[in-house]
Image (cartoon, rainbow, N blue to C red):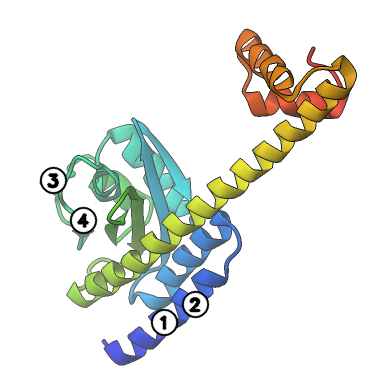
Amino acid sequence: MDWRHFAQQMASMARDLLAEHTLDSTLEQITDSAVELVDGCDAAGILVLRGDRVSSLAPTEQLVNESDRLQERLREGPCFDAARPDLDERVFRIRDFTERSERWPAFVPHCRELGVGSMMGFLLYTREEELGALNMYSREPGMFTEDSETAGWLLASHAAVAFSSARTDEQLQEAIATRHLIGEAMGILMGRHHVTEDQAFDLLRTQSQRSNVKLREVARRVRDTGTLKE
C-alpha cells in the first residue's frame, strides 16, 4: 500500500466532498470514492438503520441493495451490526464468503449466492452522532487485507464528517424553506381574513392539528389554493 499516494487521494476526496451541494451528491461521492480508493472494493453503499428498518443510501450497484435487504430480513450481518448504536465495535470484516461464519451463519451463505466474495463495514460516526455504516464489497474472496481495512477506516472517518455536515446543511435549508412557506401562507390569511400575524399562525396550527397534517403541508395548501380547506 502506497500510503503517501493514498493520503494525496484522501486530501483530494475531502476537497471534493466540501464542493458537493446536496446530501445525495455527498453520499454518492463517498461511495464512489470507496470503490476508487480502497483496494479490492468492487461496490459500496451506506446502510442506515432506523429501528428495525434498513435504508440503502448511494449504492454503487444493485448488489449493495440486495445485501442490505438480506441483512434486514435475516437481522444479521456485518453492516447491520456496524449500524447498530448499541454495539461498541466500529469495523467488521468477512474475509472469505466461501468459509463458514460463526458470527453470521445465515447471512454468509445467502450473500455468497449474490456474488459477494468478501466485505467490510465501517461505522460512520462523529463525536456527537452515529450515522450508519459504510459498506464495501468485493466479488473475490480474501481481497480485503489489514491495509484495506485501515484505508476503509480512514475514508469512513472523512465520510462521517462530510455526511454529518451535509445532513445538517440540508436540514437547515429545509427549515429555512419551511419558515418562508409558512410566512407566505400567513400573509395570505392575514390579507384574506384581516387577522393579525399571531392569529394567522394559530389558524395554520389549528388546521394542522385537526387534519393531522404537517404544518408545512397546510401552509403549502394555503399558498397554492388560498384556503385552509382541502
Query: Which circle's residue, 3 or 2, is located before the other in the chain?
Result: 2
Structural crowding at the residue carrying mark 4, measured as other residues with C-alpha within 10 Å and reported as few (<14), some (14–19) or many (≥20): some
Which callout, 3 or 1, points at the residue further toward the start of the chain? Answer: 1
Q: CA distance from mark 2 to mark 4?
A: 25 Å
SS state under label 2? helix
- Residue at 61% x, 63% y is 21
Percent coordinates x, y for residue 155 in the rendering: 34, 70
Is 69 in front, or is 97? Answer: 69
Query: What residue is shown at x 34% (from left), y 85% (from top)?
Result: 7
Element type at marker 3?
loop
| Labels 3, 4: front one | 4
Q: Earlier in the sequence, mark 2 or mark 4?
A: 2
Q: Position of residue 158 (x, y in %)?
A: 37, 68
The disc at residue 90 is 4
Residues at circles 2 and 1 in contact by the CB criterion of under 8 Å: yes
> Residue 225, how many percent across, how many down?
87, 23
Whole-number angstrom distance, CA of label 3 to CA of label 1: 36 Å
Disc 1 marks which amino acid? Ala
Q: CA distance from mark 2 to mark 1?
A: 6 Å
Q: In the figure, is residue 226 to the left or right of 181?
A: right
Look at the image and tell me whether residue 37 can be seen: yes
Mark 1 Cα shell of 10 Å, populated few (<14), some (14-19), many (≥20)? few
Determine which residue is flagged by label 3: 103
Taking 104 as reference, is 187 above or below it?
A: above
Residue 32, position in %: x, y?
A: 48, 68
Q: Nearer the viewer, mark 3 or mark 1?
A: 1
The residue indicated by pointer 2 is 15
Q: Label 4 sits on what residue type?
A: Arg
